[in-house]
C-alpha cells in the first residue's frame, strides 16, 4: 500500500513541475527597429529583434568576448543578395529577467556596419532562437513574452494563421483582394507595413489585385550584403489586403528585391502578434476588424550620404527634373548643413518636417533647380 501511495503521489507531482517557463523582454522602437537587451556570455548588450532574420553578432562583439568561428553558412539578406558568413556558437544567451537561458546558440558573425552603430546594437535576435517556443509581441505595452511550448496559446482559432512554408520562419499567406494568395514573411526588422517583392507584384498586377500609382528609379537600402544598387521601383496600391478575418484597405507599398514580400513591424500598431514556432502558427489579435491605411507619399526620396542630403529615388512626377545622386543645397532658401547619417535614419531631417510643401534647391548636372518636395 505504501508503494502504491508513493507512485500515485509522484504521478500527481509531475504535471505541476512541468510548468511553462516564461520571460518578458521589454523593447523600445528606435528608427523603426525593435531594440532589446540580452546577456551574451554574461555581458548585457543591445540587439535588433528581427523575426525575419537569424541570431547574429557583430565581429567586434565576437572579438571582445573571444567567441571563435566554428564554420560558415550561405544566406540571403533582405535585399535578396546571397552572402557567405562565418558562424559562431554562443555559450549563454540570457533574457534580461534571468528567466530563460539559451545555451549553445548558433549565430552568424557579421562584418562592421553603420546600421548597428546607428541603433546602438551588437547584432540580431532572430527566429532561429525561438523555433521550439512561443513568442507574443504586444505593441501597446512594448513587450515580448517568450514561453516554452508545452501548452498551445489559448487564443481563438479564428485568429490563427498557419505557416505556409516548411521551416521555422513565420511565413504566412495573406489575401490580396479576392482569391489572390500572397505569401509574406512577418519581419519585425522591416520598418514598413508591407514591402512588396517585385515578382509578387508582377503576378498580382496581372490578376488586377493592385494598381501602379507611380514608377521610380533609385535604391539605397542597406542590408547584410551591403547597399542595393539603384533599380526600377513601383509604388503600388492594394484596395484591400486580408490577414485572416482582418481587412486592411488602401494599402500603399513599394516594390523591392527581398527574398519574400515582408509584413513589417508596423503591423504591431494594429494588433497583437503571437508566433507559436513549435506548432508553426501565427495568431493576429486586431484592435479593430478593419483599418484604412490610405496615405500619400513624397515625389522624391532623400537620404544622407557623406554628410550631404541627396536624392535617392525619383518618382514619376519628378522624372526629368532631378536624378539619383543630385545634392540638396538649400531648403526653403536656406543653405543646408552637414547631416549625421544615424540621426537622419532615426530622427529624420527636421527642416523637412516643418511644412507640407518644401522648396528644395538641388544641384544637378545641368545646374541648380528648384522643386517642390511634397506628398502626392
Image (cartoon, rainbow, N blue to C red):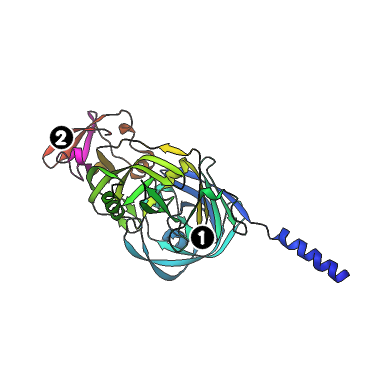
Give the residue at mark 1.
129
Assess whether residue 14 is covered by the magenta stretch: no
In the figure, residue 83 lies in which quadrant?
Answer: bottom left
Comparing 41 with 128, the one in front is: 128
**Can you name the residue that lies furthest to the front here?**
179
In the figure, residue 258 lies in which quadrant?
Answer: bottom left
Residues shaded magenta: 314-334
For mark 2, does the 10 Å Cα neighbourhood hold few (<14), some (14 to 19), or many (20 or more) residues? some
Comparing 344 with 239, the one in front is: 239
- Residue 208's spot in the image, x, y percent? 28, 47
Question: At numbered mark 2, what does the secondary structure look like: helix, strand or loop?
Answer: strand
Give the residue at mark 2.
369
Assess whether residue 324 is covered by the magenta stretch: yes
**Can you name the residue that lies furthest to the left here?**
366
**Picture residue at 31% right of the left edge, 35% below the top:** 296
> Disc 1 to disc 2, how far (Cα)?
51 Å
Q: Nearer the viewer, mark 1 or mark 2?
A: 1
Amino acid at each position: 500500500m505504501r508503494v502504491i501511495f508513493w507512485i500515485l503521489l509522484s504521478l500527481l507531482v509531475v504535471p505541476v513541475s512541468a510548468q511553462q517557463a516564461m520571460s518578458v523582454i521589454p523593447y523600445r522602437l528606435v528608427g523603426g527597429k525593435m531594440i532589446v537587451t540580452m546577456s551574451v556570455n554574461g555581458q548585457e548588450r543591445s540587439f535588433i529583434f528581427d523575426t525575419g532574420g537569424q541570431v547574429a553578432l557583430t565581429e567586434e562583439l565576437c572579438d571582445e568576448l573571444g567567441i571563435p568561428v566554428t564554420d560558415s553558412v550561405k544566406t540571403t539578406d533582405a535585399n535578396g543578395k546571397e552572402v557567405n558568413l562565418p558562424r559562431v556558437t554562443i555559450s549563454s544567451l540570457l533574457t534580461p529577467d534571468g528567466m530563460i537561458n539559451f545555451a549553445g546558440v548558433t549565430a552568424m558573425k557579421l562584418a562592421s556596419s553603420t546600421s548597428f552603430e546607428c541603433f546602438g546594437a551588437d547584432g540580431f535576435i532572430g527566429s532561429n532562437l525561438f523555433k521550439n517556443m512561443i513568442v507574443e509581441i504586444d505593441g501597446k505595452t512594448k513587450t515580448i513574452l517568450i514561453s516554452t511550448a508545452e501548452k498551445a496559446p489559448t487564443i481563438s482559432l479564428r485568429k490563427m494563421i498557419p505557416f505556409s512554408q516548411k521551416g521555422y520562419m513565420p511565413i504566412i499567406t495573406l489575401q490580396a483582394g479576392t482569391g489572390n494568395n500572397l505569401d509574406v514573411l512577418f519581419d519585425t526588422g522591416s520598418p514598413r507595413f508591407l514591402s512588396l517583392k517585385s515578382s509578387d507584384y508582377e503576378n498580382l498586377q496581372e490578376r488586377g489585385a493592385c494598381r501602379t500609382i507611380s514608377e521610380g528609379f533609385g535604391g539605397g537600402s542597406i542590408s547584410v550584403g551591403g547597399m542595393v544598387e539603384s533599380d526600377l521601383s513601383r509604388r503600388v496600391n492594394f484596395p484591400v489586403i486580408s490577414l485572416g478575418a482582418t481587412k486592411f484597405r488602401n494599402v500603399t507599398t513599394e516594390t523591392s528585391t527581398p527574398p519574400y514580400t515582408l509584413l513589417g513591424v508596423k503591423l504591431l500598431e494594429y494588433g497583437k502578434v503571437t508566433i507559436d514556432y513549435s506548432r508553426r502558427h501565427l495568431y493576429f489579435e486586431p484592435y479593430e476588424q478593419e483599418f484604412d491605411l490610405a496615405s500619400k507619399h513624397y515625389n522624391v526620396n532623400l537620404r544622407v550620404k557623406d554628410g550631404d542630403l541627396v536624392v535617392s529615388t525619383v518618382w514619376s512626377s519628378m522624372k526629368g527634373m532631378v536624378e539619383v545622386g543630385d545634392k540638396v543645397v538649400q531648403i526653403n532658401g536656406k543653405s543646408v548643413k552637414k547631416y549625421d547619417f544615424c540621426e537622419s535614419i532615426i530622427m529624420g531631417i527636421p527642416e523637412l518636417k516643418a511644412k507640407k510643401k518644401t522648396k528644395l534647391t538641388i544641384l544637378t548636372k545641368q545646374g541648380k533647380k528648384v522643386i517642390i518636395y511634397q506628398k502626392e
